[in-house]
Image (cartoon, helix red, strand yellow):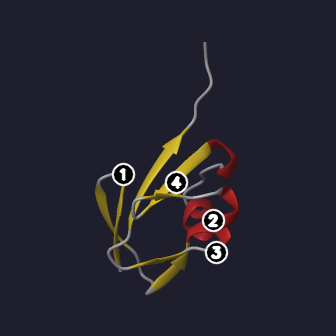
Amino acid sequence: MKIEVNGKMLELDAAELPLAKFIADRDYDPGNIVIEHNGSILEHDDYEKVLLRDTDRLLIVSFVGGG
């Protein structure tokens, strides 16, 4: 399947993939990100429920602390 993540196309070796696995495989900290999936902002509880499918679009925003 092909999905768009932050404006870049990615090809994945699965027909469907749980969003929680996708973010874990890429070492994102779920507590420090917000995800828009196909135009809708997701609640953190939804990360376990959402299945990524061909042509899905993700925007992942990470929060970084600093001074």
Residue under numbered circle 4:
35
Residue 38 appears at what percent x and percent y? 40, 65
Residue at 29% in and 53% down: 7
Q: Amino acid at mark 2?
A: Tyr
How far apart are labels 3 and 1 at the CA level? 21 Å
* As drawn, 23 above or below 60: below
Residue at coordinates 65% horizontally, 49% vertically from top-left?
29
Amino acid residing under circle 4: Ile
- The mark closer to the camera, 3 or 1, is 3
User: How far apart are labels 3 and 2 at the CA level?
Assistant: 6 Å
Under mark 3, the amino acid is: Lys
Looking at the rendered structure, the kind of residue marked 1 is Asn
Mark 2 crowdedness (10 Å alpha carbons): few <14, some 14-19, many ≥20: some
> Disc 3 designates what residue?
49
Nearer the N terminus, badge 2 or badge 1? 1
* Residue 14 versus residue 21 in the image, above or below: below
Q: Secondary structure at mark 1?
A: loop
User: Which x, y percent locates residue 27?
Assistant: 60, 53
Tell me the SS state at disc 4: strand
**Badge 1 is on which residue?**
6
Q: CA distance from mark 2 to mark 1?
A: 17 Å
Residue occupying the point 70% across, 63% down:
45
Disc 2 is placed on an element classified as helix
Q: Tell me whether the residue at label 4 lies in contact with that at label 2, contact meaning CB atoms closer than 8 angstroms.
A: yes
> Which residue in the structure is indicated by mark 2?
47
Q: Please report whichever mark, 4 or 2, sits nearer to the chain's N-terminal start.
A: 4
